[in-house]
Amino acid sequence: MTGRFTVQIDGEEAMVAWGRLLGEALASSATLFFHGTLGSGKTTLCRGVLRTWGHLGAVKSPTYTLVEPYCYRGVDIYHFDLYRLGDPEELEYMGIRDYFDSDNICLVEWPERGRGILPDADLDVMLSSQGQGRLVELVASGSRGEHIIDKIRAAEDIVKTREQTN
Ligand SMILES: Nc1ncnc2c1ncn2[C@@H]1O[C@H](COP(=O)(O)OP(=O)(O)O)[C@@H](O)[C@H]1O
Ligand SMILES: [Mg+2]
C-alpha cells in the first residue's frame, strides 16, 4: 500500500534525522499538514525538513506571526503554526492563496485551525506519544503524497540494507 506509512521514532535527534529523510522526499511543490497535540514533535520534524533544504539554524515557532518564510535552493518554503489563529477567515486577509498557489513547500502545524480556508494537503503527518518517543503516521492524498511515501520507503530500505550488511 503506497498511501500510508508508519514509523516509531525515539528521541529528538532521531526525529530531526527522520525529518531530513522526509525533506529529501519532497519535490519542490508539496503541502504537508502536521497533526498532534502540543509537544508531539511537529516543530522538531519541521526542523529536520528545513535542515535538508539548507536551513542550519534554529526554527522559530511562528506562533504569533503564523508563518515563517524560508528560501533555499530557489524554493520558497513556508512554515505555518496556526495554533493562535482565531478565525480561519484571518488566513484570507494574509493572502493565503499566494503561499499555496505556486511551486512552494508549505509545512503547516495546527491545520485544523484553518479548516475550510486552507487548501488540501498532499500528505498528512500524524504524531502521537508512544513509549519514550513518538509514533509518526503518514497518510497520502493523491499521487504527489504517494510519491513522497514511496521515496521514504525506498530510502528506509537502503538504510536497513546497510545495517544488515555492516
Ligand atoms: N521522537 C521524539 N521522541 C522523544 N521526544 C521528542 C521526539 N520528537 C520531539 N520530541 C521532544 O518533544 C518536545 C516538543 O517538541 P515540538 O517539536 O516543539 O512539539 P510541537 O511542535 O508538536 O508542539 C521537544 O522537547 C522535543 O525534544
Ligand atoms: Mg510546534
Image (tube, rainbow, N blue to C red):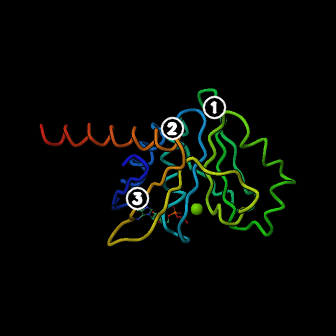
Counting residues from the N terminus, which is met first, the one under dot 3 or under dot 1?
A: 3
| Residue displayed at 80% across by 67% down | 87
Q: Give 53 or 25, whichever is nearer the viewer.
A: 25
Q: Residues within 10 Å of mark 1 (few under 14, many from 20)?
A: some
- Camera-side mark, 3 or 2: 2
| Residue type indicated by callout 3 | Glu
Residue on which disc 2 sits = 26
- Camera-side mark, 2 or 1: 2
Tag 3 near tag 2, CB within 8 Å: no
Q: Find residue 75 and name its label.
A: 1
Residue on which disc 3 sits = 12
| Residue displayed at 26% across by 36% down | 158
**Measured along the vertical axis of the image, is residue 25 above or below residue 108?**
above
Taking the image as shown, residue 47 lies to the left or right of residue 154, namely: right
| Residue type indicated by callout 2 | Leu
| Residue displayed at 41% across by 59% down | 136
Taking the image as shown, residue 102 lies to the left or right of residue 8, namely: right
Kind of element beneath mark 1:
strand
Mark 1 residue's CB less than 8 Å from ligand 2: no
Residue 27: x, y in percent? Answer: 53, 33
Residue 94: x, y in percent? Answer: 83, 51
